[in-house]
Amino acid sequence: MSGRRVLMVVLLGFLNTTILACSASQALPSPQGDQEAMQNLEDIMFYLLTEENPQPSYAQVHTLWSAARDQHLALSPLAEVQVPPGKHLYVFGDIHGQLGDLRYCLLSIEDADEHHSKPIDLLTQLYEGHCALFLGDYVDRGPNSLEVLSLLVALKLRFPEQVVLVRGNHECEAVCAEHGFAAEIRSRYYPAVREITTVIRAKESLFRIAVELFAQLPVAALLQLGSTSYFASHGGPAFENGQPLALSKLQDSTLKIFENVFAQRAPTYFVDLLWSDPGSGENLSSNPRGEGLVSWSRNLTVAACNAYGCLRLLRAHQMQRDGFGRTHLAELGDPDQDKEVWTVFSAANYCGLDNRGAVVKIHGLEGRDYEVLWWKYPAVVAYNPAMRPPQVPPAFID
């Protein structure tokens, strides 16, 4: 263990982890101790990483999330990232409140297919200048959405140029109010509040701060590694009039921010980025997830790669049995054989489905080499049957 790690672990004893509850009047508590909670981001970060059962205080969570929200993490809907020469990019898919998976990824992940591999400390890799891309769906369904979001926010604030947080379809008020995140906030910090709608609607409640934070996240990213570019979003590319949306529209810093992409009638291309899936056939087709959602074909994958000047499309959104999947593969002799879709899913045994979790490491001088780092059961993860997703084919579980 490095000296820095030992120092940080020692400092954890000074953290105040008292959980504040609501009074009998059901009034929401006001933030306290903001300055104390933010004195050392690394203290909070290592507490969340190393404590056996971390329970950050209301003040710590309120301060972290407020700081991230108020910093306006996305200057435009598209995050444009240049990975430094010689550095790697680690790509994470859905996490869904599974803190054990996230901590395993950051502290001791290894390639289970390699007999002579050694654990990789991704946190140390961040200190060394490598980059990490998180593709959304940080909350809901798992037992520790609060800790997962807090840890990711701490990482983003600590490594603002290296950590990219992209918005997922669960980072939306209409979704996370119904699939566990709001209920987790109420049970943890507002136990005296009877109606969950009070927590959802109250100004400056943790839920409202989180929703405002989600609206600050970019909905897509364009990443450059060496001479190779990748376009990334939670669901897939955006479409307008049946063709990939012009990149300039995603670079528009004046584009309206939507906290609830459905109630506020966001543009369809905004919904595409969060909800779409690769499909078969030609062009766009209806998506089994629901009305108004689309699947796109291989010819549109090639069109999107050409429009965005990228080699591949990176996404999450769909559970993968092995944590990673490649779709829209080219047939033999296709001149666009490298243009395809990669799907990453980083929540192992998601909702009891016995799948692997994975992280993809992209590296090499030209940014074309990659390794899939996967795991099965890195930690015992509590499973709440009430948070199980709808009974749909596993390929469409979000």
Image (cartoon, grey):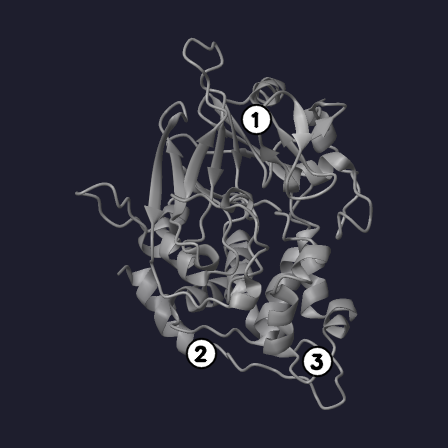
Residue found at the very far bottom of the displayed protein: 24
Classify mark 3: residues with Cα within 10 Å, few (<14), some (14-19) or many (20+): some
- Determine the CA span between mark 3 and mark 1: 51 Å
Mark 1 — residue?
280
- Given the image, on which type of amino acid does mark 1 rest? Ser
Q: What's the mark number on residue 29?
A: 3
Badge 2 element: helix
- Determine the CA span between mark 2 and mark 3: 23 Å
In the image, is residue 132 above or below residue 339?
Answer: below
| Residue 70 appears in view | no
Badge 1 element: loop
Q: Nearer the viewer, residue 71 or 79?
A: 79
**Earlier sequence position, callout 2 versus callout 3:** 2
Q: Nearer the viewer, mark 2 or mark 3?
A: 3
Q: Nearer the viewer, residue 300 or 138?
A: 300
Residue drawn at point x = 45 percent, y = 53 percent: 347
Residue found at the very far right of the displayed protein: 264
Residue drawn at point x = 64 percent, y = 40 percent: 288
- Given the image, on which type of amino acid does mark 2 rest? Phe
Mark 2 — residue?
14
Q: What's the mark number on residue 240?
A: none
**Earlier sequence position, callout 2 versus callout 1:** 2
**Earlier sequence position, callout 3 versus callout 1:** 3
Q: Nearer the viewer, mark 3 or mark 1?
A: 1
Q: Nearer the viewer, mark 2 or mark 1?
A: 1
The quadrant in which residue 193 appears is bottom right
